[in-house]
Image (cartoon, helix red, strand yellow):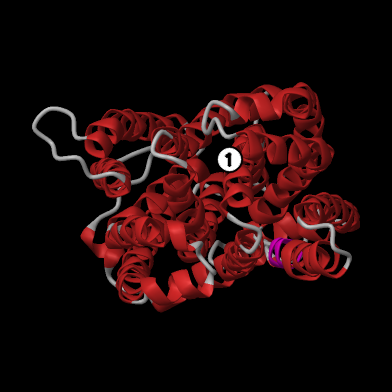
Amino acid sequence: MTTGSVRGKLLLLAWPVMLSHLLQTFYNLADAFWLGKLGRQALTAPTITMHVFFIAFALAMGLGAAGTTLVSQFKGAGEERKASLVGGQLLLLLTGIGVVFGVAGFLFTPQILNLLKTPADSWQMTYEYMRWIFTGFPLLFVFFVYQGISTGLGDTVGPMQVNLIAVIVNVILDPILIFGIGPFPEMGVTGAAVATVFSRALASFIGMHRLFRGSGGIRITAADMVPQGSMMRKIMKIGLPVSLGQLGTSLGFTFMIGIVNSFGSAVTAAFGVGNRIIHMAFVPAMGLSQANATAVGQNLGAGNVQRAEKSSKTALVLIGVILLPIVLGMFFWGADISRVFVDDPEVIELGRTMFRITTPSVFVFGFLMVLLGSFQGSGYTMPVMILNMSRLWVLRIPGAYLLAYTLGLGPLGIWWSMFISNTAVTIAGWLWFKRGTWKTKSRHLVLDTLDTESIVHVTDMD
C-alpha cells in the first residue's frame, strides 16, 4: 500500500473486504429469508437478537480495529515480529471477552427481552434464538483477531475466503435445521441460531489455523500469547475509543429497537428487513473504509504522510461513484426488495416509506465511513468514538422520541430521525477530518516502540 497507484491499490484491497462484508450479511439474510416463511413473529427473533449481538461485538470489533491499525503501521515500518505479538495479545483479550459476554448473555436473556419490550407473540421464539447465539460467543469473537490482523497486512482475500466457506455452510444448514429435512428434527427459529453459531465457529477455527501456521508474513507463536502489559495497553488505548463508539452505537440501536417494538411487530419487521438491505448498501463503504485504514496505517508507518492523505481523498471519490446507483435503486425499489423476505402488505408499505425518507442519508453516511477509516488507520480513534456515539445518543434517539411520540408522527418520526442523524454526523466528521489532526496526533501510540530515527523521520514529514 506504500507504492504504486493509490486508486488501484485501494480497489484491490477493498473488493475482497466488500465481498466479505456482503457475505457476513448473508448470515442474517439467510435467517430472515427462511424464518420469514414461518411468519413475521419468527422474523422478529433475528431482528432483536442482531442488535443485542452487536453490543457485545462492539468491544471485539474495536479491538480488532486496533489490531488492524497496529499491524498496518508495524508492516509499513518493517516490524513484522511486533505484528505477530499484536496477534497473540489480541487473541488473549478477545477470547476472554467472548467467554464473559457469552455467559452473562445466556443467564440474563429473559431480562434482556423484557427490557427491549419484545412483543408477546414473538417472545418465546426470540428467547430460544438469542440463547443459542450467546452460547457461541467465545468462538465467534476469535474471528475478529484473524480478520483484523489480515486486513492490517493488506491480505483481504484470506478473510473473504473463510467467510465464503462459513456462509455456504450456514445457507445449507438453515433450511435443514429450521424445517427438519432428512434425519434432522424440525427446530424452527432455534435451527437458524444453531446454523449461525456452527458456521461462525468454523470460520474462527480456520482463521486461527492460518495465523498459527503463518499468514501474510507473520506467525503467532506460544511466546506471543504470554501476557505483555505494554502491548495490551497499546491495543486498549487505540481500540477502546473505537469499541466505546461501537458500543454506544450498538446500545443506541438496541434502544431504538425498543422504540420500534412499541409500535408492533409489523413496524419491527419493516425496520429489521429495511436495516438489512441498508446494511448491504453500506458494504462498499465498509470495504473502502478498511482499505483506507490499511493504506493510511502503512503509509504513516513508512513516514509517507502525503500518500496517506491522498489515499483518504481518493477513497472519498470512489465511494461517491460506487454508492450513487445503489442508493437510487433502494429509493425506487427498496420496498419490492423487502417483499423477498416477508410478503406482508403492512410491512411492505411501512418499508416503502422508510426507504424513501432514509435513502439520501445512506448515500451521505457512506462518506463518513470512509473518513472513519482515516482516523482508525492513523491510531487517532477518538473521533470514531465521538461521532458514532453522537449519531445515536445526541441525534437519533432524542429525535425519534420527539418526532415519533411528542409530535405524534409514529414510525414516520423514526425514519426522519435516521435521516437527520446520518446527515448531521457526516458533516461533523468532514469538518474534523479537514482539521488534519488525524495525521499527527496519535501515530506515536504505535511508533513509540520503533527506533528513534523512524519517529523523527515521521515527525519531520509533518
Examine the image and state in which quarter residue 180 appears: top left
Instruction: Report the residue at 42% width, 52% height from top.
Output: 144
Q: Can residue 5 be seen in this view?
A: no
Crowding at mark 1 (Cα within 10 Å: few <14, some 14-19, many 20+): many
Q: In this view, does 226 lie above or below 70?
A: below
Indicate the secondary structure of the residue bearing disc 1. Answer: helix
Q: Is 132 on the left-hand or right-hand side of 109?
A: left
Q: Which of 418 and 379 is in front in this view?
A: 418
Q: Give the residue type at disc 1.
A: Val
Q: Which of 278 and 192 is in front in this view?
A: 192
Magenta residue check for 373: no
Q: Position of residue 91 (x, y in %)?
A: 34, 61
Q: Where is residue 47 in the image (x, y as percent from the top left)?
A: 51, 51
Quadrant placement of the N terminus: top right
Q: In this view, does 8 lie above or below 42?
A: above
Q: Is residue 336 visible?
A: yes
Q: What stretch is highlighted in magenta?
A: 384-389
Q: In this view, does 207 lie above or below 7?
A: below
Q: Is 223 on the left-hand or right-hand side of 378?
A: left
Identity of the residue furthest to the left in this view = 183
Instruction: Report the residue at 44% width, 33% height from top.
Output: 33
Q: Is residue 127 above or below residue 300?
A: below
Examine the image and state in which quarter residue 89 appears: bottom left
Q: Is 204 on the left-hand or right-hand side of 77?
A: left
